[in-house]
């Protein structure tokens, strides 16, 4: 089973995934990556939900296109038991909250966005939506987390 490495880019993770099933060690310079789309598994034994078309780059030694089927992960289901409530401090920003979510849920930061408003100290918890970016090769969907100051 392939595991996403959150310290690598989405493209680097896709290259690593491709290399798990290939006799050629791709570097990513051989092709361009199209926009992933939802895909229905061909049969009950196929564990896929997405497909993306790779197009060979001129001079790479390859020609044409290849459509690859694979599984993008559902946001909120990337790490069982990951917390969805975050306690923040006065210096936290949208970026520090996003990084905390990425670390906790093992997400590549460039492939998701967060939306919400950081609550003021003493305000009730705020709900933030954590959403896969359009065209993410790694993730689909959205989930919510709560953000609050300590009581």
Image: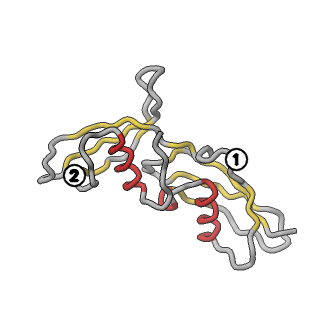
On the image, which quarter does residue 11 sit in?
A: bottom left
Q: Is residue 124 above or below residue 51?
A: below
Q: In the rendering, at what x and y percent does residue 27 appear?
A: 27, 54
Task: Work out which residue is located at the far top of the displayed protein and give it.
Answer: 43
Q: Quadrant of the C terminus?
A: bottom right
What residue is shown at x 74% (from left), y 78% (from top)? 90
Q: Which residue is mark 2?
A: 30
Q: Is residue 18 above or below residue 88?
A: above
Q: In the rendering, at what x and y percent does residue 115 appear?
A: 62, 61
Q: In the rendering, at what x and y percent does residue 125 appear?
A: 79, 62
Q: Which residue is mark 1?
A: 81
Q: Is residue 79 above or below residue 93?
A: above
Helix, strand, or loop for circle 2? Answer: loop
Q: Would residue 77 appear left or right of 110 to someone viewing this image?
A: right
Helix, strand, or loop for circle 1? Answer: loop
Task: Work out which residue is located at the far bottom of the displayed protein and give it.
Answer: 91
Which of the two labelled residues, at mark 1 and mark 2, occupies the earlier sequence position? Answer: 2
On the image, which quarter does residue 37 sit in?
A: top left
What residue is shown at x 63% (from left), y 64% (from top)? 100
| Residue 22: image tag | none
Find the distance from the CA under tag 1 to the CA under tag 2: 38 Å
């Amino acid at each position: 089973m392939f595991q996403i490495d959150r310290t690598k880019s989405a493209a680097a993770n896709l290259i690593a995934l491709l290399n798990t099933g290939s006799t050629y060690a791709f570097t990513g310079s051989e092709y361009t990556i199209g926009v992933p789309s939802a895909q229905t598994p061909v049969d009950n034994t196929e564990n896929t939900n997405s497909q993306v078309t790779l197009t060979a780059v001129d001079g790479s030694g390859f020609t044409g296109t290849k459509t690859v089927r694979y599984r993008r992960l559902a946001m909120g289901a990337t790490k069982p038991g990951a917390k969805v409530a975050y306690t923040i401090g006065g210096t936290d920003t949208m970026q520090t909250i996003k990084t905390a979510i990425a670390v906790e849920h093992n997400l590549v930061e460039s492939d998701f966005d967060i939306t919400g408003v950081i609550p003021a100290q003493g305000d009730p918890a705020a709900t933030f939506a954590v959403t896969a970016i359009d065209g993410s090769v790694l993730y689909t969907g959205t989930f919510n987390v709560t953000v609050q100051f300590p009581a």
